[in-house]
Image: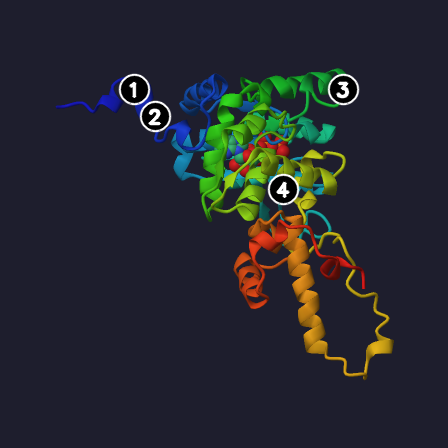
Amino acid sequence: MEQRPDAIGKERILYPADPSLHLVGDSAAIEEVRSLIRYAAATSIPVMITGPSGSGKEVVAKALHHCSERVDEKFVGVNCGAIPRDLLESELFGHEKGSFTGAIAQRKGQFEDAHNGTLFLDEIGDMPFDMQVKLLRVLEEKQIERIGSTQSIAIDTRIISATHQNLDQAIAEKRFREDLFYRLSVFPIDIPALKERRDDIAPLIRHFIKKIGGDEIYFTREAMDILENYEWPGNARELRNIVERAVVLFPGIMITASQVSSLFRRRASTAPTYQEHALPSSFPSRGESRPFSYVAGDGSSKGILGSGFDLKKHLMQEERKYLLSALRMAEGVVAEAAYLVSLRRTTFVEKMRRHKIERKMALVEPQSSSTRVE
Ligand SMILES: Nc1ncnc2c1ncn2[C@@H]1O[C@H](COP(=O)(O)OP(=O)(O)OP(=O)(O)O)[C@@H](O)[C@H]1O
Ligand SMILES: [Mg+2]
């Protein structure tokens, strides 16, 4: 019988999917991570993924699950740092009805839920110390007991844990149990910071553009140089944020070096101190407005009402001023100007047409009548 090439060598048929489908990057470091995933996927040994925030630990965990024999079973993620201590035990192991105040019904825990599948213990470094003992016992005995029950339930769950913390230090400071560390990190996978694998930046940009959808965006060589030489303290997540901003502000446009710099400046102006987990909120939503270069009226309109004042006409004039002002601030980039006044690009273009505003009007010095404080 003819043998399929991919069936030669037993270990190869164990990989239903290739990690490169899930994990983007051309660097040697990412290739190494992919080969570690392939090895680990053929077994059920505990894997610990380390790496700085936003480096792709969750992506690696999911890739590992997808490449393993457990692919058709559940991937269950628990953020050990985000769940209060009192709830974490029940979250992981479940409880019987009436076992504590509030336990109004029986509940299965995540270990049971991930039976035959994969349990991803994210931010394991934040797990409370006394819970660490319980977890260790479960891992050793491969069985759990729901809170309030004496019955043991056998579980077969692949454990992947992840942390951005330095666990050696946590162990030295007696915040993390050394025995649990060895039990969890039988097979360690470390993801370097993005600045250590700059070859991944271009493929990640392409990947994010595709994932985000919308119009294609392009970067000049100089713009790419900036992106490839930046430090990326927030790693791939920060890169994704920048790409998202670029897609919104410069759809279908060849983005220049100064426009790329403006993407970074924009963040700096709204989030002066960089916070890894605060990135999404540091990007102003469409509803938030930015300060304008002039103030349109201060509310003291009493004097003009009644003397032939035409509200419609007045509002049209005001609208025209804002459109022009936004267009100037955005240096003629319509998408950006629209963003500045929280309008859709198409709406902005429509209004430009109605007001007979042309892009080139943004590039000339503002006339005093259109920018004067009224
Ligand atoms: N190699 C990669 N290929 C594709 N997408 C990636 C890659 N690395 C990171 N990403 C994307 O970057 C973002 C951050 O990745 P992820 O959530 O896995 O990071 P993390 O290391 O778990 O971060 P944290 O420590 O903050 O939890 C996600 O949107 C993810 O899809
Ligand atoms: Mg994560």
Q: Which residue is mark 3?
A: 174
Q: Which residue is mark 2?
A: 14
Q: CA distance from mark 4 to mark 2?
A: 31 Å
Looking at the image, tell me whether mark 4 or mark 1 is earlier in sequence order.
1
Q: Nearer the viewer, mark 4 or mark 1?
A: 1
The circle drawn on residue 10 is 1
Q: Is mark 3 within 8 Å of ligand 1?
A: no
- Residue 373 located left or right of residue 362: right
Circle 4 SS class: helix
10 Å crowding of disc 1: few (<14), some (14-19), many (20+): few
Q: Amino acid at mark 2?
A: Leu
Q: CA distance from mark 4 to mark 1?
A: 38 Å
Q: Can residue 32 be seen from the camera position used here?
A: yes
Q: CA distance from mark 2 to mark 3?
A: 39 Å
10 Å crowding of disc 3: few (<14), some (14-19), many (20+): few
Q: Nearer the viewer, mark 4 or mark 3?
A: 3
Could you say where residue 165 lies in the image, as x and y percent from the top left?
68, 24
The circle drawn on residue 335 is none
Quadrant for the C terminus in the image: bottom right
Q: CA distance from mark 3 to mark 1?
A: 43 Å
Residue at the left extreme, as displayed: 1
Q: Can residue 285 be seen from the camera position used here?
A: no
